[in-house]
Image: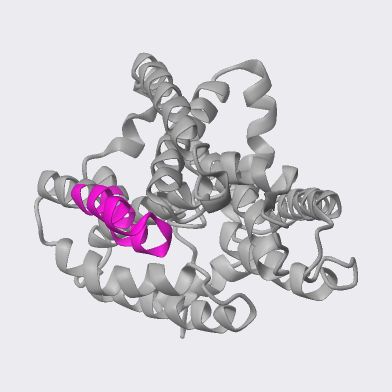
């Protein structure tokens, strides 16, 4: 690889914190990362949520507040990141789609390795759907892409009840939102954000009541998927509103640091779960309070680590490697 001075922009997982727009996207990634962790620990450690046909309290709360709630947001943000990348690469390279393809192939390799530790993980699917779906649609007008993405999301939710099959629709929707310039308009959406939050919150209440009709089946069902999508919108718009308050401005640096290193933190969280989960007695157990404490500990460590690292380096470790492979150059880390 050739050596090059790192450009000023950061894209996809490693977004720039130089402006409020990117900062807000990073904060959303940080929020999604924390929510996904709450779900992943129980899944990786094969912790049962139902015993003697009775839903345990903590898994039940997680089913209602976390499961399928943060995964859609994470997927949508991946699509936004790929859209931003292609736009910026188009201003710097003659063949930006080749760069996006290389970026997706690199993500597929990382996802395949990660799959060995966490079967069913999302990175590999993001890459595969990105290659098969996003790349061809990158030639399609943005409004058509938005219609395709929303239609795919709705249809796949109804037919399959969510899960990984929501990924292609959410990726395309996020990609179209980037094409439409939504990331640049976040600061001008104040009243619209409040309206979206109120509508999403109302939709979430209705969807949760629907999901609660059959709590033992909660998971990959249409009711869970609908509740997940509406709550993902509520969480995202709610956080964007909170970030405009004094409390939110104090919270933002930590969430942004987690989000700027989301790829590194996502992978290292799995390594920590696999390394220490069994030692904590989580494997196959119902020690859900211990699981919550473990999740909190991981998030605290990652928040401190991310802020320490980014105070000294421009990119997270995996974000830097991903960038170098994408551009086939060695960028300065500092």
Q: Main secondary structure of the magenta part?
A: helix
Residue toward you, 52 or 67: 52
Residue at image position (68%, 20%) is: 247
On the image, which quarter does residue 182 sit in?
top left
Residue at image position (42%, 21%) is: 202
> Would you say 151 lies left or right of 315 here?
left
Place of residue 95 in the rendered image (x, y in percent of width and height, measured from the top left) = 20, 72
Place of residue 251 in the rendered image (x, y in percent of width and height, measured from the top left) = 68, 31
Above or below for 283 versus 185: below
Place of residue 199 in the rendered image (x, y in percent of width and height, measured from the top left) = 37, 21
Residue toward you, 49 or 124: 49
Residue at image position (28%, 50%) is: 158
Q: Is residue 243 visible?
A: yes
Above or below for 5 versus 87: below
- Find the residue positioned furthest to the top: 191
- Find the residue positioned furthest to the front: 52
Q: Is residue 323 visible?
A: no
Magenta stretch: give its range.
151-173
> Would you say 86 lies left or right of 307 here?
left
Is 223 magenta? The answer is: no
Residue toward you, 155 or 5: 155
Q: Quadrant of the C terminus?
A: bottom right
Residue toward you, 133 or 154: 154
Residue at image position (31%, 68%) is: 130
């Amino acid at each position: 690889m050739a050596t090059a001075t790192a450009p000023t922009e950061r894209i996809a997982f490693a977004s720039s914190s130089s402006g409020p727009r990117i900062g807000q996207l990073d904060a959303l990634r940080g929020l999604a990362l924390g929510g996904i962790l709450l779900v992943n620990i129980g899944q990786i450690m094969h912790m049962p949520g139902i015993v003697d046909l009775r839903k345990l309290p903590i898994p039940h709360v997680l089913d209602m507040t976390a499961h399928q709630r943060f995964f859609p947001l994470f997927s949508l943000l991946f699509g936004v990141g790929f859209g931003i990348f292609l736009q910026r690469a188009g201003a710097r390279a003659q063949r930006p789609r080749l760069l996006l393809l290389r970026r997706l192939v690199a993500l597929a390799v990382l996802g395949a390795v990660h799959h060995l530790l966490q079967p069913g993980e999302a990175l590999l699917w993001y890459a595969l759907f990105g290659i098969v779906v996003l790349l061809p649609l990158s030639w399609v007008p943005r409004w058509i892409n938005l219609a395709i993405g929303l239609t795919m999301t709705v249809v796949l939710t109804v037919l399959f009840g969510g899960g990984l099959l929501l990924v292609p629709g959410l990726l395309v929707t996020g990609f179209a939102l980037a094409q439409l310039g939504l990331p640049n308009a976040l600061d001008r959406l104040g009243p619209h954000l409040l309206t979206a939050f109120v509508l999403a919150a109302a939709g979430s209440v209705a969807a949760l009541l629907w999901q609660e009709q059959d709590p033992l089946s909660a998971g990959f069902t249409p009711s869970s998927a609908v509740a997940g999508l509406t709550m993902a919108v509520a969480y995202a718009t709610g956080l964007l509103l909170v970030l405009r308050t004094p409390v939110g401005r104090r919270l933002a640096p930590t969430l942004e640091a987690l989000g700027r290193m989301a790829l590194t933190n996502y992978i290292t969280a799995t390594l920590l779960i696999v390394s220490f989960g069994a030692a904590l007695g989580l494997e196959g157990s119902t020690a859900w309070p211990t699981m919550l404490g473990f999740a909190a500990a991981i998030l605290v460590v990652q928040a401190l680590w991310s802020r320490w690292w980014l105070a000294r380096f421009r990119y997270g470790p995996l974000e830097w490697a991903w960038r170098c492979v994408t551009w086939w150059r060695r960028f300065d880390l500092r």
